[in-house]
Image (tube, rainbow, N blue to C red):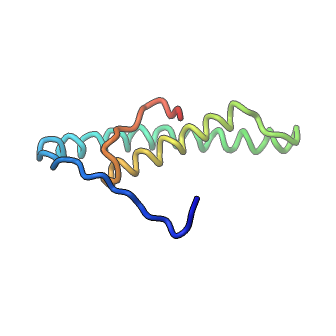
Amino acid sequence: MAFPMKPEIKFVEKASRLELFIRLILCFVYGIIAEIWAIFVLIVWVLQWFYILFTGRRHKSFENFTKGFWRYWVRVVAYCLMLTDERPPISGQA
């Protein structure tokens, strides 16, 4: 990565009002999904802590579950703040 960085922003045609309304509804739905997922991530964090405490290493499935949540969360925030037009996948895959 070279410094100073020069961001490149591609101009896309104007968004219609209907598309922005749909985005608002989708952000609400994505937020509900993220909050439910966050509850499970909190439980997994506690289980991961005990697993590390007793075994001295991380459980790979717990770690992948948490990473998937954070990938999804960042994509939802970027989509809802209109930083990207790409809708986040529900799966949390890279």
In the image, what residue occupies the spot 76% across and 34% down? 59
Q: Which quadrant of the figure has residue 29? A: top left
Q: Residue furthest right?
A: 55
Expressed as whole percent of the image width and height from the top left, the position of residue 44 reads 65, 38
In the depicted view, which residue is nearer to us: 57 or 9?
Answer: 9
Expressed as whole percent of the image width and height from the top left, the position of residue 2 reads 57, 63
Q: Residue furthest front?
A: 2
Q: Which quadrant of the figure has residue 9? A: bottom left
Expressed as whole percent of the image width and height from the top left, the position of residue 54 reads 87, 40
Q: Total marks drawn?
A: 0
In the image, what residue occupies the spot 20% across and 40% down? 22
In the image, what residue occupies the spot 38% across and 57% down? 8
Q: Residue furthest left?
A: 17
In the depicted view, which residue is nearer to us: 1 or 61?
Answer: 1
- Left of 4 or right of it: where is 28? left
Expressed as whole percent of the image width and height from the top left, the position of residue 21 reads 17, 44
In the image, what residue occupies the spot 64% across and 35% down? 64
Q: Residue furthest bottom?
A: 4
- Left of 11 or right of it: where is 45? right
Quadrant, the N terminus? bottom right
Where 56 falls versus 91 (above or below)?
Answer: below
- Left of 28 or right of it: where is 3? right
